[in-house]
Image (spheres, helix red, strand yellow):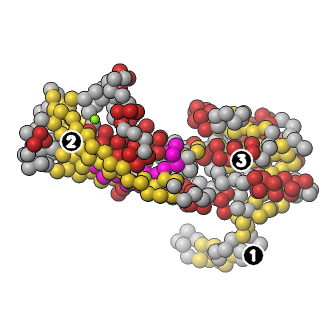
């Protein structure tokens, strides 16, 4: 029996937020999409296609590097994406269709789905019982009906099909047909579909907090690591300084190889410190001309990538700027917001504060300014 799989990863916007679509974000050190593809490969599925949004080709290539998958351009609806994917998979005897946003796929689930098909189902999907009671509500949140949960289940993916039944069901679809999932397509064509015992780890990543929850469910002891960083830059000619990504008018500028953003440089070192990844100079050598005048946002984004790749999550950061002038207070909230945006954190978990040194020392003489930062990371033990 030949087996193939289509992983649907064509989603764009979602409720998870962040710069990168959820299927390409890191979970426990790997892109979300890669988890499922690796499991399908390990289970011996011969041919794997991934349906993607056209603008995500580079993200998909990076996430599936070395795994030999066919990329298929998805359509406007899930139904259109699967139609395109089925053409790429050809004539396999058995086809798994899986949501990329469910990375907790296990070989055991794949086996039990394949068994259900071998035993005569046209389609099969994992499903879990519902433990909460169910009520129907109206638009005003008033309960209008009780719903018997006994006969109801929550259906997950992969949804697994006899290849001929799936192809026939899709071939019979009207041009503009749109179904919520593939079981519905096959059932509409008269195919018998069954459920197998689902798995809590197959939860769909939908909201930002789901990443943390799934990491806990998928296991792995985690520890908290705290890193600190310090940086200083000398004042020179100029009429503004850049601190925590915000340009502040001043009677002087800051001298440095990059944009001399001491706040973000200290923060990058704090994150690298928590990761045990050396210091900013090792990652962005001042001797390398590509960093001349560089926007420090690039350094900070790179630190976030390194944290992602280590399966670490930045939990909280605290930056202290040390200078007599310019006054930081009026710009503090913008600095917090800029930093929060780059780190992908809610602003409540980003602190920026300032102090003077009571006119003592090089900071007091306004020869330059300095910054100190602390980063708290949650990471695999
Ligand atoms: Mg620096």
Residue under pointer 2: 370
Secondary structure of residue under mark 2: strand
C-alpha distance separating marks 2 and 3:
48 Å
- Callout 3 crowding tier (Cα within 10 Å): few <14, some 14–19, many ≥20: some
Left/right placement of residue 288 relative to residue 182 reads: left
**Label 3 beta carbon within 8 A of ligand 1:** no
Report the front residue among 241 and 194: 241
As for residue 176 lying within the magenta part, the answer is no
| Image point (66%, 54%), residue name | 104
Magenta stretch: give its range.
308-319
x, y percent for residue 77? 67, 44
Q: Dividing the image into 4 quarters, which one contains the N terminus?
A: top right
Q: Quadrant of residue 245?
A: top left
Residue under pointer 3: 39
* Between discs 2 and 3, the one toward the N terminus: 3
As for residue 312 lying within the magenta part, the answer is yes
x, y percent for residue 260? 26, 33
- The residue at the far top in this view is 289
Report the front residue among 96 and 191: 96
x, y percent for residue 163? 86, 44
Residue under pointer 1: 150
């Amino acid at each position: 029996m030949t087996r193939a799989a289509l992983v649907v990863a064509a989603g764009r916007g979602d409720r998870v937020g962040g710069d990168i679509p959820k299927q390409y974000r890191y979970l426990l050190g790997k892109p979300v999409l890669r988890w499922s593809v690796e499991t399908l490969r390990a289970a011996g599925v011969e041919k794997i296609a991934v349906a993607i949004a056209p603008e995500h080709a580079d993200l998909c290539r990076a996430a599936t590097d070395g795994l030999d998958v066919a990329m298929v351009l998805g359509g406007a609806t899930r139904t259109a994406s699967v139609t395109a994917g089925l053409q790429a998979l050809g004539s396999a005897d058995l086809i798994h269709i899986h949501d990329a946003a469910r990375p907790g796929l296990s070989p055991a689930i794949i086996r039990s789905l394949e068994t259900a098909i071998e035993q005569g189902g046209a389609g099969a999907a994992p499903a879990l019982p519902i433990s909460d009671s169910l009520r129907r509500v109206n638009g005003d949140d008033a309960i209008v009906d009780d719903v018997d949960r006994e006969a109801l289940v929550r259906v997950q993916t992969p949804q697994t099909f006899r290849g001929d039944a799936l192809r026939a069901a899709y071939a019979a679809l009207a041009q503009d047909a749109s179904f919520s999932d593939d079981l519905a397509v096959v059932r509409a064509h008269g195919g018998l579909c069954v459920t197998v015992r689902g798995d809590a780890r197959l939860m769909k990543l939908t909201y930002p907090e789901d990443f943390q929850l799934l990491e806990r469910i998928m296991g792995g002891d985690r520890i908290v690591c705290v890193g600190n960083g310090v940086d200083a830059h000398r004042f020179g000619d100029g009429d503004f300084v850049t601190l925590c990504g915000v340009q502040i008018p001043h009677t002087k500028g800051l001298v440095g190889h990059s944009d001399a953003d001491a706040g973000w440089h200290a923060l990058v070192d704090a994150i690298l410190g928590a990761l045990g990844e050396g210091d900013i100079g090792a990652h962005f050598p001042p001797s390398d001309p590509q960093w001349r005048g560089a926007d420090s946002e690039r350094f900070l984004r790179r630190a976030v990538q390194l944290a992602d790749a280590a399966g670490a999550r930045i939990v909280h950061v605290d930056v202290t700027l040390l200078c007599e002038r310019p006054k930081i207070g009026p710009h503090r909230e913008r600095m917090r917001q800029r930093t929060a945006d780059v780190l992908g954190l809610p602003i409540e978990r980003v602190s920026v504060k300032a102090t003077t040194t009571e006119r003592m020392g090089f900071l007091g003489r306004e020869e330059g300014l300095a910054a100190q930062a602390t980063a708290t990371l949650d990471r695999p033990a």
